[in-house]
Image: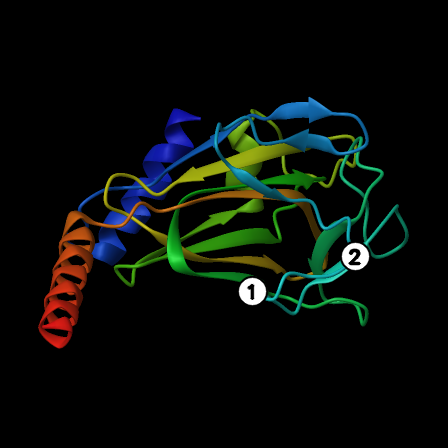
Amino acid sequence: MKILSTLACATLAAAAGSASALPTFTAGGTALAGEGLVTSVAGATTIDFNSGILPANYIDGSLFTGTDGNHAAPPGDTSMYLSAGISSDQHSPVTANFAGGLSYFGFYMGSPDPYNSVTYSFADQSSTTLTGTQLASLAGDQANGDQSVGLYVNAFAGEGGKITSVAFHSSSNAFETDNHAFIAAVPEPETYAMLLAGLGLLGFMLRRKAS
């Protein structure tokens, strides 16, 4: 886990140049019947896809249940899940956009393959990509398509950082994920200052109008 976190951070630092913080990546979640694994990070909001409707901020995603020739449900997951791939019933990449930025994003994945990858983009215009091999190694597993293997991947943007999009890629079939979880980034202090200044100006104008 330490090796992968170091590699991922080095990639981000090279892309960001003077980034204020580096992201970290870990594996670990909480078992939930019928869902496989869910996030164990407190305060996170989870998207489980069980409504059968893809959220509006997700682009080109396809939802499935069960296992067939093109996709396999993550272990222990009997609910709906998201899949990226090259067959006619799915797409790659599948991108989730978060306009306000996130401090945390997590997801459950099954049967890791070397042709899977996930790209995180950040508010400072940097990005980092983790391959299926790197993702699997977070949990000490191999990326060999073993359908009995599942892991929960956590990405933390780091102090001052914001994840603005997450893209799931697969050059074959398929990259199956579920139980996406996120925490919205806390606004920077200068954002609060601008908000307070705006409210103060509004109050001043209202007082002048009243007088």
- What residue do we see at 77% from left, 57% from top? 63
Q: Is residue 146 left or right of residue 117?
A: right
- What residue do we see at 80% from left, 30% from top? 76
Q: Quadrant of the C terminus?
A: bottom left
Residue type at the position of mark 1 = Asn
The tag earlier along the polypeptide, 2 or 1, is 2
Q: CA distance from mark 2 to mark 1?
A: 15 Å
Q: Residue furthest front?
A: 211
Q: Quadrant of residue 53?
A: bottom right
Residue 126: x %, y % from top left? 30, 59
Q: Nearer the viewer, residue 42 or 83?
A: 42
Q: Is residue 120 left or right of residue 174?
A: left
- What residue do we see at 68% from left, 64% from top? 61
Residue 129: x %, y % from top left? 44, 52
Q: Nearer the viewer, residue 70 or 97?
A: 97
Residue type at the position of mark 2 = Gly
Residue 79: x %, y % from top left? 82, 42
Q: Quadrant of residue 111?
A: top right
Q: Quadrant of the N terminus?
A: top left
Q: Which mark is residue 173?
A: none
Q: Is residue 170 left or right of residue 20?
A: right
Answer few, some or many: residues within 10 Å of disc 1's Cα (few below 14, many 20 plus, some between 14 and 19): few
Secondary element under disc 1, as helix, strand or loop, is: loop
Q: Nearer the viewer, residue 75 or 196?
A: 196
Answer few, some or many: residues within 10 Å of disc 2's Cα (few below 14, many 20 plus, some between 14 and 19): some
Above or below residue 134? Residue 40 is: above
Q: To which residue does mark 2 refer?
A: 52
Q: To which residue does mark 1 refer?
A: 57
Q: Nearer the viewer, residue 13 or 96?
A: 96
Tell me if label 2 and label 1 are in contact, CB under 8 Å. Answer: no
Residue 59: x %, y % from top left? 60, 68
Secondary element under disc 2, as helix, strand or loop, is: loop
